[in-house]
Image: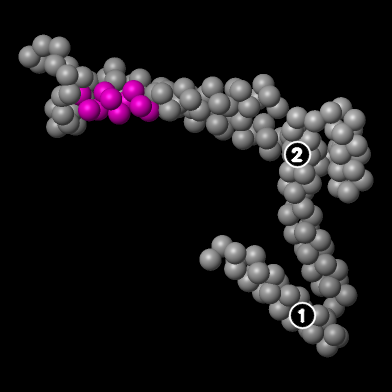
Amino acid sequence: MNNNQPNNDESLLTIKADELIQLLKKGNVDKELVKAIQQKINNAIESNSNQQKFDAFSELDQEQSRLDMVTNLEFLLTQHQVDSRESKKYLLHERIKHIVLVAIAVTMIILGLAMIIMPAPPYFEMFTIFYFSKDDGITLMDVISVLIVLSGVYLFINALLRKINA
């Protein structure tokens, strides 16, 4: 099903482009409207190609000789015209992704610890897995809380390692 999706998108895009061309050929359209439509199309194409430009450069991270790396970089720079404005925008998006990931990780850690520390009502303490005494033990909620904390720690470490490697 996924193999047909790009083909369907391409055929739909071709059909819509043909319809737009037919409408423009009729000549009942104002020049300003045509320029506005052209600008919208150019902006849509540019926003789609910006991510693809930077994705091509990530292939340079593979293990290869310095000469091959420089040759590949030269080839990529001739194929993808990247200016400082686009690279700043790309770096800003990457920073925001890292900040959001760290915020989610810290939130998970705090909420998991809060679930462990704060007392819960008896109906929320589902099952006791291991008893320390007659009235106290490790409950299923404690295990779930620890899993939440460990997930937050994993996300936090993963975000930091990505930031260091980037």
Residue 7 image position (x, y, % from top left): 65, 69
In the image, what residue occupies the spot 77% across and 80% down? 18
Q: Which mark is residue 31?
A: none
Q: Residues within 10 Å of mark 1 (few under 14, many from 20)?
A: few
The range drawn in magenta is 139-148
Secondary structure under tag 2 reads helix
Residue placed under numbered mark 1 in the picture: 18
In the image, what residue occupies the spot 30% across and 28% down? 144
Left or right relative to 8: residue 36: right
Left or right relative to 115: residue 52: right
Residue placed under numbered mark 2 in the picture: 59
Q: Is residue 136 above or below residue 71?
A: above
Residue 59 image position (x, y, % from top left): 75, 39
Furthest residue to the bottom? 26
- Estimate the spatial distance between the alpha carbons at disc 2 and disc 1, rounded to whole Å: 36 Å
Label 2 vs 1, first from the N-terminus: 1
In the image, what residue occupies the spot 14% across and 32% down? 123
Left or right relative to 101: residue 112: left
In the image, what residue occupies the spot 49% across and 31% down? 104
Q: Is residue 69 magenta?
A: no
Q: Residue flagged by tag 2: what amino acid is it?
A: Glu
Q: Quadrant of the C terminus?
A: top right
Residue 34 image position (x, y, % from top left): 84, 73
Q: Quadrant of residue 115?
A: top left
Q: Quadrant of residue 13?
A: bottom right
- Frontmost residue, 11 versus 37: 11
